């Protein structure tokens, strides 16, 4: 006896904020597994989300795509949309190519973080955040209120870069989260798999657009842009 399909969920995340530009990631999942995702960019978060949902709708047979007005990440938005089983076919198993992550060697984190920590303190002073306000933001974004628990250099750098982009007096309870490099790399690998590219094709595409041979040389903002280029390439072929 087959079990009925559970209702899909939409997961909406505001990934990047700068003057005149908002980038939103929309993922659709069922039973805790992501079955499709799309990026959208526009001048407002709402318009960016609508654009991402539109891209999803072009490749998924959906009955309706509700729009959320969330300006910060909203996880697990229940959607009354029914996704037919064939939507799973949009994500075939990766072919027998070498894994996408073979494009480059993982970076080596520096041993000395003192420079980044000093810059972090300067940004907190500029924003006017005390320890309690910093704890509010850290708890929202990283799940703990103490920066000493940031054991990943990538997370520390993402936190610093996020603060550097905030306006003076930003509210830690609503300030957008930083770009998370681990999540961006994971999404990049998924897109490369969907394109069915081997490492050589991925490297050539990277060199074409950024004149670099490794994704690890990209800044977080450039990595986000690279993902959007990959998604545009995938959309053009489907």
Image: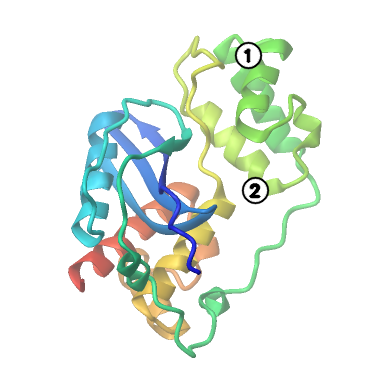
Residue at horizontal 45%, vertical 86%?
Answer: 95
Quarter residue 107 falls in: bottom right
Where does label 2 land, which residue? Answer: 154
Image vertical order of residue 215 relative to residue 124, above or below: below
User: x%, y% of residue 78?
Assistant: 41, 37
Image vertical order of residue 84 relative to residue 147, above or below: below
In front of the other: 78 or 102: 78
Quarter residue 41 falls in: top left
Instruction: Count neighbours of disc 2 (C-alpha within 10 A) and say few if under 14, some if 14 to 19, many if 20 or more.
Output: some
Residue at horizontal 49%, vertical 51%?
Answer: 219
Quarter residue 10 falls in: top left
In front of the other: 78 or 5: 5
Instruction: Count neighbours of disc 1 (C-alpha within 10 A) and say few if under 14, some if 14 to 19, many if 20 or more.
Output: few
Query: Would residue 232 be visible to someone looking at this image?
Result: yes
Image vertical order of residue 190 relative to residue 72, above or below: below
Q: CA distance from mark 2 to mark 1?
A: 22 Å
User: x%, y% of residue 230?
Assistant: 33, 65
The C terminus: image quadrant: bottom left
Per the image, label 2 sits on a secondary structure element best described as helix
């Amino acid at each position: 006896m087959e079990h009925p399909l559970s209702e899909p969920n939409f997961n909406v995340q505001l990934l990047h904020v700068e003057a005149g530009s908002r980038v939103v990631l929309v993922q659709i999942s069922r039973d805790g597994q992501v079955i499709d995702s799309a990026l959208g960019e526009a001048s407002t978060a709402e318009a960016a989300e609508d654009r991402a949902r539109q891209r999803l709708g072009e490749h998924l047979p959906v009955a309706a795509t509700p729009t959320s007005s969330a300006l910060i990440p909203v996880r697990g938005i229940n959607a009354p949309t029914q996704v037919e089983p064939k939507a799973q076919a949009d994500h075939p198993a990766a072919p027998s190519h070498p894994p996408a992550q073979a494009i480059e060697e993982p970076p080596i984190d520096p041993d000395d973080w003192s420079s980044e920590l000093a810059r972090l303190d300067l940004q907190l002073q500029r924003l006017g955040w005390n320890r309690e306000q910093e704890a509010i933001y850290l708890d929202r974004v990283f799940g703990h209120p103490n920066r000493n628990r940031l054991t990943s250099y990538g997370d520390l750098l993402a936190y610093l870069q996020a603060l550097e982009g905030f306006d003076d007096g930003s509210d830690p309870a609503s300030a957008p989260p930083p770009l998370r490099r681990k999540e961006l790399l994971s999404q990049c690998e998924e897109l490369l798999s969907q394109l069915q590219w081997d490492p050589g094709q991925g490297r050539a595409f990277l060199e074409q657009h950024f004149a670099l041979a490794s994704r690890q040389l990209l800044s977080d903002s450039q990595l986000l842009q690279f993902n959007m280029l990959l998604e545009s390439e995938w959309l053009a072929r489907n």
